[in-house]
Amino acid sequence: MTAIPATGRARADIMAELAARKSGDRDWRRGRLAVYFYWLDEELERVQQEAYLAYWTENNLGQRAYPSLKSLEEEVIGMALSLLGGGPSAGGTFTSGGSESIFLAMMAARNKARAQRGVTRPNIVLPDTAHLTFDRAAEALGLEVRRVPVGPGFRADVPAMAERMDAETVALIGSAPNYPFGTFDPIPDLAALARSRGAWMHVDACVGGFLAPYVRRLGHPIPPFELDVPGVTSLSADIHKHGMAPKGASLLLVADAADREWHKFESRAWQRGPYVAYTTQGTRPGGAVAAAWAAMMHLGEEGYLRCARLIMEAKAIMTAGIAAIPGLAILEPSDLGIFVWRATDPALDIGKVAAALDAEGWLVGRQQEPDGIHLHLNPIHREVAGEYVEAVARAVAAARGGAAGRIGANERTY
Ligand SMILES: *Cc1c(COP(=O)(O)O)cnc(C)c1O
């Protein structure tokens, strides 16, 4: 077992050891992963790091002490609201990540339905492509999860979801887009349904929030999913995904700021006095807020459009290249920079192709259903899109040649 060392080590020694340990990690700066990271260039990296460092230990719980953090947080929320259809009464909360944003949305939906509709056995209805973090939140919050198979084109089947709703349904969920396929659910239809039943409508735009509006401006068809769609109650958008901020930054936005009260905790049942929190955290990293603000300020709309263009170009190169390799096909449709490819030739074992790619240093994301390979692109993939296609061609040849090893779809690859 490791113990705290009896005597401390020097800074240089510590840093040398960290560098040595890190040297075996995957080379994400060279685009060898299509999961977990988002990277544009060294200038943005420095902006993120220096902004984080400027607030590296400031506690965002203590906004009395750090009014600057309060103003930075408010500006981040304001910029996101203006991008994502927030009207004059909209509001938002800065959280640690998509999972926390979604947890708070589900908690608010439950609390509101309990208070206003007397719901005691709450359930949520969602397409089966929705992120599993909804199930995790539901487990903690005592919600029954009703996952409904998606319809054609991997999009939510609205009539089937309507069927599964009842008087105890507290929330309806749609993704913009979902993670398994990168497709958008029909948010206007879902939101109209939620509204007609008095349920909370949550849009999971963790992936799409800071990318889809710019992809739309480039001329790609992106359906409406924002806060101004009638019936939408809340929307989660991760700044630490396509908002291009370092980790620990997401937003839960609400069309009506009054709905924030449903995920507020407030008590004075101890000696120290009142305690109020709108998130699941107490102490919160100020660096995450400062770095998110700095990334948004540095990129501007122009920078986000550049990211969107690079991603969509990378996707076009990769999908055309892969589709041209005999025995492979791209799963259609997909609306953003997420896509799945698979083997259409039954003699080709996609698990072996995955193992061959892995052996070349590409970290492979295996899709369980249908059996395939999943990519979630970020701007750096534009530079390596051609290399990736060549690597796939070599991996297919290796798999056909009977190279040893395979990566199964049931291995934990997320
Ligand atoms: C990443 C993601 C989440 C969860 O966000 P974390 O930041 O990983 O907690 C939720 N929904 C979708 C669609 C995501 O891609």
Image (cartoon, rainbow, N blue to C red):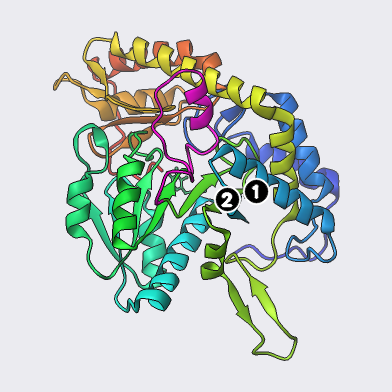
- Residue 218 counted in the magenta span: yes
Q: Position of residue 238 (x, y in %)?
A: 55, 44
- Does 170 sit above or below residue 275? above
Q: Position of residue 343 (x, y in %)?
A: 22, 22
Q: Which mark is residue 77?
A: 1
Residue nearest the observer in this picture, 212 or 52? 212
Between circles 2 and 1, the one closer to the viewer is 1
Q: Is residue 40 visible?
A: no
Magenta stretch bounds: 206-231
User: What is the chief secondary structure element of the magenta stretch?
Assistant: loop
Please name the amino acid that badge 2 sits on: Leu
Question: What residue appears at the point 18 percent right and 48 percent down from the top-left corner?
Answer: 159
Residue nearest the observer in this picture, 302 or 97? 302
Q: Position of residue 303 (x, y in %)?
A: 65, 24
Question: What residue appears at the point 53 percent right and 68 percent down from the top-left corner?
Answer: 263
Residue holding disc 2? 251
Secondary structure beneath label 2: strand
Q: CB atoms at circles 2 and 1 under 8 Å apart?
A: yes
